[in-house]
Image: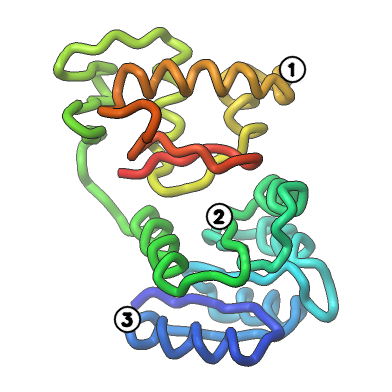
Amino acid sequence: MIRILVVDDEPQIVRALRINLKARGYEVDTARDGASALHLAAHHHPDLVVLDLGLPDMEGTEVIGGLRGWTNVPIIVLSGRADSTDKVAALDAGADDYVTKPFGVDELLARIRAVTRRIQPSDSSPIVKIGSYTVDLSERSISPDVRLTPTEWQLLEHLIRHPGKLITQRELLHDVWGPQYQTETNYLRQYMARLRRKLEADPARPQHLITEPGMGYRFRP
């Protein structure tokens, strides 16, 4: 059973999440502040953390930093701060996704499912469907035949290997182009547009290569 740690100081949100998550078969621990969250995480080793940024004793980014010191457990930030600066700071600190309050429970549950799919052991081959195309990462081939440049392959592979995860612009620029390119967001826009033209049925309304405005991109299987 997957264990989820919910960290929030709003009792009604904690109660709603506990009820909805337990109804879907998750085991749930809760904490109302950062210190309790770090203590629970160290002793019960959750498979996933749902974390509010505005905690009474410390910033949520400090909790993320504390967790990232010893674990790669997926973290979904749940916060009323809608400013892109707060979102990017949380993602750069090590969060895997960001959901803004007020939120729909169905959306949050979908994000949780996307993250928990990644933590399940898998023996599957590196073959992924994108619409009518089949991408084989091991062979670096796409059928029906589509040609990608080396940079396009690197960008696509980085997204595909993290299905459902929101990957920040800075992370993609660092990992694909190098640390000296972390502010060149125009590179990402241009290359993502190229990938969509090649792989999406309707590049103007992408279903798989998704932009999260002001934050980054995600691959939706």
Q: Which residue is located at x 67 percent, y 56 percent?
A: 68
In the rendered image, the quadrant that contains the N terminus is bottom left
Residue count near mark 3 (Cα–Cα under 10 Å), binned few <14, some 14–19, many ≥20: few
Residue 161 image point, x, y percent: 39, 37
Residue at the image position 68 percent from the left and 78 percent from the top: 37
In the image, what residue type sits under mark 1? Gln
C-alpha span from label 2 to label 3? 20 Å
Q: Secondary structure at mark 3?
A: loop
Q: Which mark is residue 150?
A: none
Looking at the image, tell me whether mark 2 or mark 1 is earlier in sequence order: 2
Using the image, tell me which numbered label, if any, was put on residue 97: 2
Q: Nearer the viewer, residue 128 or 124?
A: 128
Q: As drawn, is 39 to the left or to the right of 18?
A: right
Q: In x, y percent, where is residue 190?
A: 53, 16
Image coordinates of residue 169 in percent, x first then y, are: 62, 33
Which of the two marks, 2 or 1, is nearer to us in this view? 2
Badge nearest the viewer, 3 or 1: 3
Q: Report, in whole angstroms, how far the alpha carbon at label 2 lies from the one at label 1.
A: 25 Å
Residue beneath disc 1: 180
Left or right placement of residue 199 versus residue 21 in this view: left
The amino acid sitting under disc 2 is Asp
Marks 3/1 in contact by CB < 8 Å: the verdict is no
Q: Which residue is mark 3?
A: 24
Which residue is nearer to you in this view: 62 or 56? 56
Dot 2 lies on which element? strand
Query: Which one is nearer the viewer's eye here, 111 or 202?
Result: 202
Counting residues from the start of the chain, the first of labels 2 and 3 encountered is: 3
Circle nearer the N terminus (3, 1): 3
Q: Seen from this angle, which residue lies furthest right?
A: 57
